[in-house]
Image (spheres, rainbow, N blue to C red):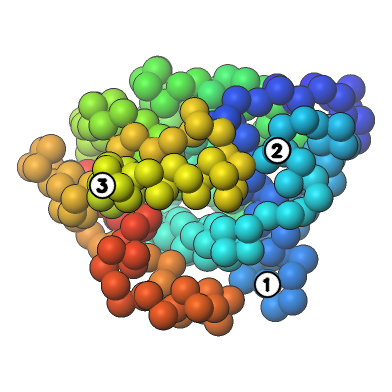
Amino acid sequence: MISMDNANSVRGLKLSDVEETGLLTLYCRAVESESPDPILRDEKALELVHKIDPLLVDTGRPLLKRLYTRKIDKQLVVYVALRAVHYDHCAKSFIANHPEGIIVNIGCGMDTRFFRIDDGKLPFFDLDLPQIITAKKKLLSETERYHMIGKSVFDYTWMDQVAALGVRPVMFLAEGVFMYLPEDQVRALVLELQKRFPGSELVCEVVNKRWIQGFFGKITAVKMNRRMNIGKQAGFLFGLTDSRELESWHSGIQYVDEWSYFESNHEKLGTLRMVANWPLFRKAQYTVHYRLN
């Protein structure tokens, strides 16, 4: 939990392994924003990390120490930036096609998407656990259109706040969320979204089930726990064998398309582009777009 006397005075920080990943992606966007020819420029992320940095000076947490010293895996920085750009694009395209639409950012962490895509009319909801939203509200201010909800995504009462805006098109974004949750709970959530918001759209990040089981699962765990200093409690739990798997959950769930960061063919991917056409790597962790009819 982040505690502050005001926006510029910071004291005290305590986060779980999963919550730390929210800071990790924030710092990735900030680092990329200051790099030569940045993939994205996130001014609000830069503002937030400058406020959070004083909290991390004497931290004993390996990941938080890496954030403070900016010793973050370069491939991860590029991946997070490319992913953020894609989700921003999905949201902007949705609003362009549905001017009265609403964006809901599930498991938002310290994401600053609203400030990157706001068109001056957009109603936007950030949703995350109470302790994260409490911290975020000390860094950012809500407005008439920007709302922060501090509830578990499985406490479906948060949906009432979205529905209170009336029957309007809704896009749910779940960037870096579902893989950390049990499959039965992800399924129940998606079905509830389909029930409560028929005609809505869901853009969610998923992992290939092969990368969370057996030998490949061990490789993933080693990479997260050792190479990136991500705590063991933040391991992957849910994966898909095929993007259309969700269609079997309900006849109203319709696959639209999928995206892998390899599709950008960005020069900052470096040697990773060599494995872009290998299905096992291309779709190890990727994004799928669904309609919830």
Relative height, residue 232 to residue 97 (above, below)? above
Residue 203 rendering spot, x and y as whole percentages? 35, 51
Q: Give residue 209's mark.
A: 3
Question: Which badge, 3 or 2, is on the more N-terminal residue?
Answer: 2
Determine the residue positioned at 57% across, 64% down.
75
Determine the residue positioned at 13% across, 37% down.
249
Residue under pointer 1: 38
Label 3 residue SS: helix
Q: Give residue 62's mark.
A: 2
Q: Nearer the viewer, mark 3 or mark 1?
A: 3
Determine the residue positioned at 26% across, 68% down.
279
Mark 3 to mark 2 CA distance (whole Å):
28 Å
The residue closer to the viewer here, 148 or 136, is 136
The residue closer to the viewer here, 107 or 70, is 70
Mark 3 to mark 1 CA distance (whole Å):
32 Å
Q: Quadrant of residue 34?
A: bottom right
Quick check: marks 3 and 2 in contact, CB under 8 Å?
no
